[in-house]
Amino acid sequence: MRSLALLVNPHAAGGRPLRLLPRVEARLRELRLPFSVQRTQSLLHGCELAREAAGRGEVPVTVSGDGLIGAVAGALRDVPDAVFGVLPGGRGNDFARMIGLPLDPVAACDVLAEGRPTAIDMGAANGRTFLGVASLGFDSEANRIANAAPPQLGRLVYVYGALRALATWESARFTVEVDGERADFDGWSVAAANSGFYGGGMRVAPHARLDDGVLDVVWLAQSSRIGLVRLLAKVFRGTHVDAPGVSVRRGAEVRVSADRAFTVYADGDPIGNLPIVMRALPAAVKVLLPA
C-alpha cells in the first residue's frame, strides 16, 4: 500500500489545484490510499517537502502545473529509491500528456494506486534540471508574456503569448552545436526537448522519448510572420517538423548562443541565459506511469 504526500500548489492555474482537491481526496479514500496534504509556498518549498516525504518512504505527488513537477523531479534525483507521482492541476499539463496520464486529476488517481515506477530521463542546463522542453529565442518572449497573462485564458495562454510576441519580434543569429555538430542560422527559436510537449499540448518534438538518453533539438530558421502563424497550427499535430526552415537533431549535449541575450525557459519557468549548455540525464528519476 503506497502512502502519498500530496504537494498542492495553491497558485497554479489561478488556484485550480485547490478547487480540485476535495474530489481528489474523495477518490483517494475510495481507493483506500493513505495520504497527507501540504500546500507549497514556492518551488523550493515544494522540493523540500518532496525530499522529506521520500525520506519517510512516501510517494510525493504534485498537484500542480509543470513547473512544480519538474522542480520536484530534480530534487529527487539523488534520493535513494525515490518515486514521485503526478496529478495534473496546471494550465498546460504537458508532462501528464507525455506519460499518457489522464488529464482529469480524479481519473489520474488510479495511476497512483496501480502505476508502475519507471525510470525516465531529464535534461540539465547550468545546474538546473528540467523534465520537458528548454526553449529560447522567440519562445523566450512568448513565455514571458504567457506567464504574466490572466489565468482565465487556460491553455490558450501560450497561443496568446506567441501572438503577442509576434508583433515586436526581430530575427536573431543563432549558433547551435549538437554533440559537436555546429549550425549557424538566422531565425526564430531553438528548443531542446526531453519530452515531446510544451505550451499546453504543442507537439514541438513529436519523436522525443523519455527513455532514450538524448535531447531532440528543434529550431526554426528565418521565416515570415505569416509563415510562423501557419506553423503554429501545425505544432499541435507535430507536423511542423516537415516544414521548410525547421531542423531537427538529436544528441546528448547541446550548446546554444546568439547575437543577443535570451532567457531560456523550461517547464514554464526561466532556467538560465545564453550562452548555455544543455545535457541529457539518462534514467535520472522514477515516476509512476500508467500500468
Image (tube, rainbow, N blue to C red):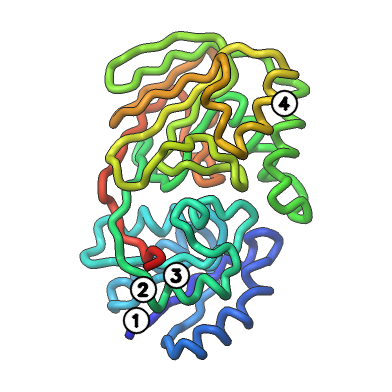
Q: Which mark is residue 59?
A: 2
Q: Secondary structure at mark 4?
A: helix
Question: Gap in Å between the C-alphas at discs 4 and 3?
Answer: 37 Å
The residue tagged 4 is 229
- Apparent side of residue 129 relative to residue 14 in the rendered image (left or right): left
- Apparent side of residue 197 relative to residue 291 in the rendered image (left or right): right
Q: Secondary structure at mark 2?
A: strand
Q: Is residue 261 visible?
A: no
Q: Nearer the viewer, mark 1 or mark 3?
A: 1
Tell me the amino acid under the disc marked 1: Arg
- Apparent side of residue 42 relative to residue 51 in the rendered image (left or right): right
Tell me the amino acid under the disc marked 2: Val
The residue tagged 3 is 61
Identify which residue is drawn at 57% across, 66% down: 9
Residue 198: give x, y in percent of width and height: 55, 42
The quarter of the image holding the N terminus is bottom left
Q: Quadrant of residue 248?
A: top left
Whether residue 250 is situated above or below residue 16 in the rendered picture: above
The quarter of the image holding the C terminus is bottom left
Whether residue 22 is situated above or below residue 188 in the rendered picture: below
Residue 278: give x, y in percent of width and height: 36, 32
